[in-house]
Amino acid sequence: MNEIFEKEMQTILKDEYQDFMKALQLPPVKAFYLNPLKKNGLNYFNQQYIQPHPVVDGGYYFDYEKYPLGKSPFFSCGLYYIQEPSAMLVADFLDVQADDYVLDMCGAPGGKSCAIASRLSNQGLMITNDINTLRAKILSENIERFGLKNTIVTNSDPVQFTKILPEFFDKIILDAPCSGEGMFRKDDQAIETWSPQKVQECAYIQRQLLDYAMGLLKPGGTLIYSTCTYNTVENENQIHYLLSHYDCHLKPLPRSHGMANGIGLDGVIRLYPHRYHGEGHFIACIQKNGQPEKRKYKPMKSRISKQNQKLVDDFYKQYLNIPTPHYLYDNQNHIYALLPQFPELQGIRVLRNGLYLGECKKNRFEPSLALALTLTIPDVKQYYRYHEKDSEVKKYLHGEAIPGGHQKGYGVIFVEDYPLSFYKESQGLAKNLYPKGLRR
Ligand SMILES: C[S@@+](CC[C@H](N)C(=O)[O-])C[C@H]1O[C@@H](n2cnc3c(N)ncnc32)[C@H](O)[C@@H]1O
């Protein structure tokens, strides 16, 4: 480990330093949180290997050696998201209301966005962004797996948002790129790439992102700023900067279970692995002063050709028991379901304009995995329902067809009550529509 880092930690932790170093030798801890959109999910966990998170409702620690949750089909059904237990606090402290408009500026891979968007109603809005294209694609997959309809995924420099949506958001998460000191136990690369210069580079980017965030936040709105690092340059100094440059104040966060106070700043939270059961983190909550005004913005316009609208309508009538979504958006025959509160995003690279329903191809509509993952058993005309350990589930996830017996056409595979994927029945076989990239 870098000597400069060690010296800095000795200065920060004083007589707790040895305990901190000992904690770094222990294995990292893992947790998951349940998707509130998938009801009664907890019934399907082996209670022997899970333990409730002391603060986050719906969060659980689990023993990943004995209980490899990433391999369960319920993971593919979006029943839960595996997330580091300190990171889990960030979305919890945001205190989202069902109709909030929320921006996650650095969203990938999506743990916090999924937690927040699944707590918003369909009147709420989540825009989750990441500047890195590969990571933004993973973010999009995670949003789909969670069955979210109220979420737009973008891949832009956040400065672009300041040009079109000033003072638009009720809540913003800035989980900033950082020097990663809090990840040393989890990620060897974080140790190898750490340097004092990296700290300064990250601080520079964070400052820019904080300026953008303050421009995007509504008066009265709240910003959660978090990092997974310990140094004050990337943490408390950034909050002091906000407090002295913007009309805003700090909202003190409640401390419990070994959470430490800030350094020279009360009301923010520092998490250290020797005190709190998780990795290192810093969290602060800032509220912008002032009275919110009515939002002014151009809503995204619904647009679809008559021909494609008919293909989608026919599909819904034939295979589903729910109406076609009201506002459709056709991007080169890829059809999305918009919500009326979605804003026009000119100049922003949008990866996912709300729920991706599927593709119109020649004379038919081919439904997407994302649509399947939003459905319940009463929503579909035909389906196969299996238990977690049934061989059909394993085969389906592997990409194989399953012996069928239903009418020709589309249906959904459910594991217990949770949708896994569409299938296409023909000649006594439920043909596999599980995307090739996800098969295992
Ligand atoms: C700590 S991670 C975010 C983790 C995420 N909030 C989650 O809960 O899964 C930081 C992210 O910031 C992204 N990033 C780096 N610089 C950025 C920038 N200038 N604008 C937006 N995102 C940026 C990185 O690609 C990375 O995915």
Image (spheres, rainbow, N blue to C red):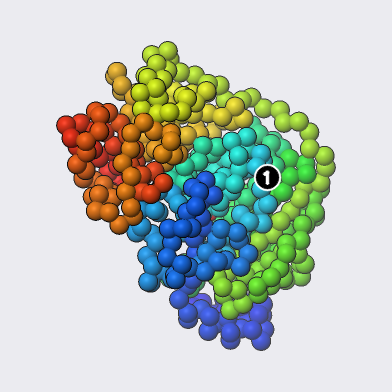
Residue 56 appears at what percent x and percent y?
60, 61
Decide if residue 320 is in sight here. Answer: yes
SS assignment at label 1: loop
202 vs 318, left or right, is right
Q: Where 341 sits versus 60, above or below?
A: above
Residue underneath mark 1: 97
61 vs 17, left or right, is left
In which image quadrant can residue 253 be found? bottom right
Decide if residue 332 is in sight here. Answer: no
Task: Give the class, few, some or many, for how many residues have Cα within 10 Å of label 1's Cα (few <14, many ≥20).
Answer: some
Q: Residue at x 76, y 61 (%)?
A: 252
Q: Residue at x 61, y 43 (%)?
A: 120
Kindly identify the amino acid type of the residue bearing the numbered disc 1. Gln
Q: Where 24 sits versus 378, above or below?
A: below
In which image quadrant can residue 335 be found? top left
Residue 392 appears at what percent x and percent y?
25, 49
64 vs 237, left or right, is left
Using the image as rendered, state which of residue 217 and residue 424 is in the foreground.
424
Q: Where 253 sits versus 126, above or below?
A: below
Q: Residue at x 56, y 73 (%)?
A: 277
